[in-house]
Image (cartoon, rainbow, N blue to C red):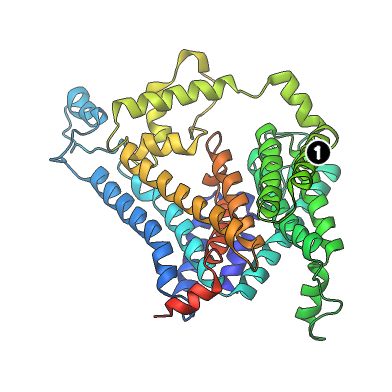
Amino acid sequence: MVALAAFVLAPLPLGSTDPIWICIWSALMAASLVTADLGGIGREDVRLLAPLLVTLATVAAITIAQEWREPPFALGSPVWQLPSTGLGIPAPSRISTTVSGPWLAVGYPLLLAMVFIRAFAISADASSARRLLLILAWAGCAYAVYGILAEVSDPNGLLSRRKEAYLGYATGTFVNRNTAAVFWGSSAILFLAPLLRFAHRRDHPDAPASPRFSDRVTFYSSSPVALGIGLAICVTAIAMTGSRAGLLLSICALLLACGLYLAPLPLGGLRRWGFAAGLAVVALLLLQFVGGAVAGRIGTYGLIDEQRSNAYQSAIAMIHDYPMLGIGWGNFEAAFPAYRTAELGSLGIWDRAHSTPLELAAELGLPAAGLIVACCLWYVYLLLRSSLRRKRDRYIPIIGASVAALGLAHSCIDFSLQIPGFGIFFAAIVGCGLAQSIPSELRKERGKF
């Protein structure tokens, strides 16, 4: 229950961007992991988690190196020479541009890793995985309902305060509409995949398993009608954000989920091409009728943000100057003014690179960023492979693969995964999908610890 509370409530306090919320969710997740029953975890599960653990250890070692006083293995940042040359005050040199940046930055990735591992452990059992995804789906739908109603009733409000940006667009409990769009896109996938399963198999029971309240709630909330309503609400909320990348990538992720579900089915060539054409038509209709405002923004501003492109150039310049160990984790905002191009002008504070891979490469160096990207791509590959090969509950890894593709693709052009409210939700879904990428038979054959 503690882990579920963190998964569901993380988006509520304005996306949990305040550091105090990262501390609270980390404490809850640590307590949940310590008290968790890991009896369902076997050798194969540990092998799946090994790349994540190796990546965490590598990043931790680089963080320590960045904070090392007078590092013997690398040149320190030139910024530490300024106190002695300008003021005559000696200051120990470090690789990191700031003293506290790396230590403050390490908390959030550690939280994501704990969420991922806890969701993985919960989802080792297929019935628990199905229940977790259903809870997350309706939690996302509840935030979508709030976002729609809030935009209609008080378009300038954001929970208990006034909006400072994105006036006239739905953001739900998030400050940024792009993050809200990807969050609701992930929620839409949670409804679409089981709906596809029902359309194919039509195996929804005719009555609840028992008269217990929890069984009745599960029965009615997983019915095709309820899933269709939840999907429609989430898609409507995505359109109301006005996010160009959010809507386009969400549509692509929904199409990916459909494609992964249909690909292994024995449909025949003609029917397969018919389904593909139908999906393309549905995507165009969604963009035209549901995303009319987004289509208008694309026509007015295009798909490429010129300011963001200039910020990318600045991040690439940082990588060029510090390719191996970076400028120090969490130091992008501190280092950016020295690399700010004239095209960006003097307005605005760039505290993020608006591209998570570029920011990781600038802060941690190319080797560490490459390892993180390789770990993510490996897990996406495992999810895609399981989506095509698994026999039972195949929709679970399909959800994991589609949400992973959506979140990772959007984070390449924005910072959605750097917002804890979405990052926790994302890690829980992907961890659940990865746990079910192992066939039940293989888990039984390999045995438990």
Asked whether, in this view, residue 342 is left or right of residue 62, the answer is right
Name the residue type under label 1.
Leu
In the image, is residue 280 above or below residue 295? below
Measured as percent of width and height from the top left, residue 412 is found at 52, 36
Q: Name the element at disc 1.
A: helix
**Front position in the image: 437 or 426:** 437
**Front position in the image: 181 or 420:** 181
Name which residue lies at 86% across and 77% down.
206
Name which residue lies at 67% across and 35% down.
164
* Neighbourhood count class around disc 1 (C-alpha, 10 Å): few under 14, some 14–19, many 20 upward: some
Asked whether, in this view, residue 248 is left or right of residue 94, the answer is right
Q: Quadrant of the C terminus?
A: bottom left
Q: Residue furthest top?
A: 342
Whether residue 173 can be seen here: no
In the image, is residue 75 above or below residue 377? above
Whether residue 374 can be seen here: yes
Give the mark count: 1
In the image, is residue 283 above or below residue 372? above
Asked whether, in this view, residue 257 is left or right of residue 199, the answer is left
Q: Which residue is mark 1?
A: 286
Q: Quadrant of the N terminus?
A: bottom right
Measured as percent of width and height from the top left, residue 302 is found at 68, 21
Measured as percent of width and height from the top left, residue 354 is found at 52, 33
Asked whether, in this view, residue 410 is left or right of residue 276, the answer is left
Q: In which quarter of the view is residue 6 placed? A: bottom right
Q: Residue furthest bottom?
A: 211
Measured as percent of width and height from the top left, residue 387 is found at 60, 57
Name which residue lies at 42% across and 54% down.
107
